[in-house]
Amino acid sequence: MKFFALLTTLLLTQFTAFAQIEGITEVYTTPNKLLQTIGLVNAFLDNADTAPLAPDCKANRSIKKQKKCTEKFIYKNISNSITPDKIANIGLSKFSTEIDFIINELGEVIVTNITGDFEAINDSYFIALKNLPKFIPATKNRKPIKVPFKATFKHTRLGKITKMSLK
C-alpha cells in the first residue's frame, strides 16, 4: 500500500511539472524571457547537491541559480547552431526537435537521442552539443553523478526558437 501511495505521488509530481512546461504557448524572442518562464525541471537535480555547471557559471551560488546559469549556457550555444537559412530551406512554418542527452560524471555531454523531421537540423544540434565544453558535473554526497536531460525546441520558419524546455 505504501508503495502504491509513493508511486502515485511521484507520478502526479512529474505530471504537474510536465504540464507546467507544456502549457507555455507564448512566442519568445529573447533567451532571458524564455528562461524566466520555463526553468530547469529535472528530478535528478532535485536530489543533487549541485547542478552541472557550465564554464561561465559560479559554484558558490544556490542550486537554483546553478540550474538557471547552466540552462542559459546550453540554450545560447545550441540556439546559435540553428541558422535562419537552415530553417528557411525546410519550407515548413513550424516544427520541433527533441534531444535526449546526459552530462556524465566527467562533465561530458553524451547525446543519446535526437528526434526531428529534418536530418540537417538534427545534425546541427548533434554537432552543437558535441562542441559544448566540459561541464563541472553535478554532485550528490560530494561524488559526481550523471544527469539526463530532455530538450525540446520548437521553431518557426523565420528561424526563431519559440520554445525550449529542459527536463
Image (cartoon, grey):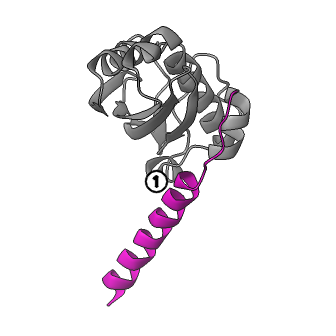
Residue 75 in picture, x, y percent from top left: 56, 25
| Element on which disc 1 rests | helix
Magenta residue check for 46: no
Disc 1 target residue = 43
Quadrant housing residue 104: top left
| Magenta span | 1-29
Quadrant housing residue 54: top right
Residue 11 in picture, x, y percent from top left: 40, 70
Query: Residue at coordinates 71% horizontally, 41% vertically from top-left?
Result: 36
Position of 147 relative to 84 (above/below):
below
Query: Residue at coordinates 52% horizontally, 53% vertically from top-left?
Result: 22
Quadrant housing the N terminus? bottom left
Relative depth, front residue between 68 and 113: 113
Position of 8 relative to 26 (above/below):
below
Left or right: 14 in relation to 105: right
Position of 131 relative to 35 (above/below):
above
Q: Residues within 10 Å of mark 1 (few under 14, many from 20)?
A: some
Magenta residue check for 22: yes
Hey, which residue is sitting farthest bottom in the picture? 1
